[in-house]
Image (tube, rainbow, N blue to C red):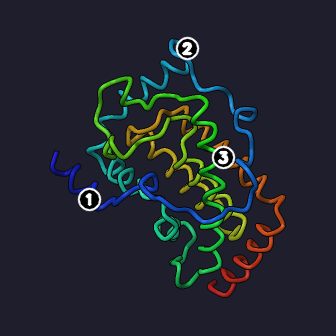
Amino acid sequence: MKWLAFALLLAGTPATAQTSQPEGYLDGVGVDLLQVLPPAPERGSPRYEADRRTFRQTRELLRTPRGEQAIGDVREDVPTMLADFSEAVGRPLTTENAPALAALLTRMRPDVAGTVNAAKNVWRRQRPFLIDKGATCQPREQVNSYDYPSGHTSWGTAVALVLAELIPDRATQILERGRVYGDSRYICGVHNLSAVEGGRFAGASIVAQLHGNSAFRHDLEVARAELLRLH
């Protein structure tokens, strides 16, 4: 599968390999997702079997353009997220032309990761490739956390919601890109569909709590003013 190895080189190293994160906005783990999300699917339940069917049925997508997009969506660092959402926003976004926005996303990122990982480590849902055989678009040794909820999807949803609030005239396009980013995780084969669905709810819950933080609201307004100057 030379095409896959080459694409993975382009995709780069995912955030799971990063060793340091800045301080976030929230204290502790933020939202208690154990109280917010439905529990991870249990073996033999309809949701569990639906996850298995989705994994098996989507393996063939890896050799399509949609599979290539899923490979590109493996990366979740802030500069890449700005680039990924630029088309949806309708203008190029970089750390150079939108430093306030980049700083906002950088600071909220550990809030998303900490909240999601706290729930993952309780539910301990297996990744789909550990249950059924099938190719993945990301090296399995790089996927070293539990499945539910999806951290990538939570992060992509959070970014999309913030950008949609800051640029409301492009909200439809931005939110669509956020959905596609999440879908890439089960197309990639490294998350179950239920984890993607849970990640969307998790991301929205975290952004809702962030709005209760005065520092977040201040930085949001600074980013809004910055983007108005770019328009």
Q: Residue at x 58, y 36 (%)?
A: 120
Quick one: which residue is furthest to the bottom in this view?
Answer: 229
Query: How far is disc 3 from disc 2 in space, using C-alphas?
Result: 26 Å
Q: Residue at x 50, y 52 (%)?
A: 181
**Amino acid residing under circle 1:** Leu
Say whether marks 3 and 2 touch (CB < 8 Å).
no
Q: On residue 9, which mark appears?
A: 1
Q: Residue at x 53, y 79 (%)?
A: 95
The residue beneath circle 3 is 115
Say whether marks 1 and 3 touch (CB < 8 Å).
no
User: In the displayed structure, does residue 206 sit left or right of residue 79?
Assistant: right
Image label count: 3
Q: Residue at x 66, y 62 (%)?
A: 108
Q: Earlier in the sequence, mark 1 or mark 3?
A: 1
The residue beneath circle 2 is 45
Q: Quadrant of the C terminus?
A: bottom right
Residue 169, percent across and down?
69, 69
**Amino acid residing under circle 3:** Thr
Query: How far is disc 1 from disc 3 in space, using C-alphas?
Result: 29 Å
Q: Secondary structure at mark 3?
A: helix
Residue 65, percent across and down?
32, 51
Q: Secondary structure at mark 1?
A: helix
Determine which quarter of the picture holds residue 220: bottom right
For discs 1 and 2, the disc positioned in front in the rendered view:
1
**Amino acid residing under circle 2:** Ser
Q: Earlier in the sequence, mark 3 or mark 2?
A: 2
Q: Earlier in the sequence, mark 1 or mark 2?
A: 1
Q: Nearer the viewer, residue 197 or 139?
A: 139
Quick one: which residue is furthest to the left in this view?
Answer: 2
For discs 3 and 2, the disc positioned in front in the rendered view:
3
Q: Secondary structure at mark 2?
A: loop
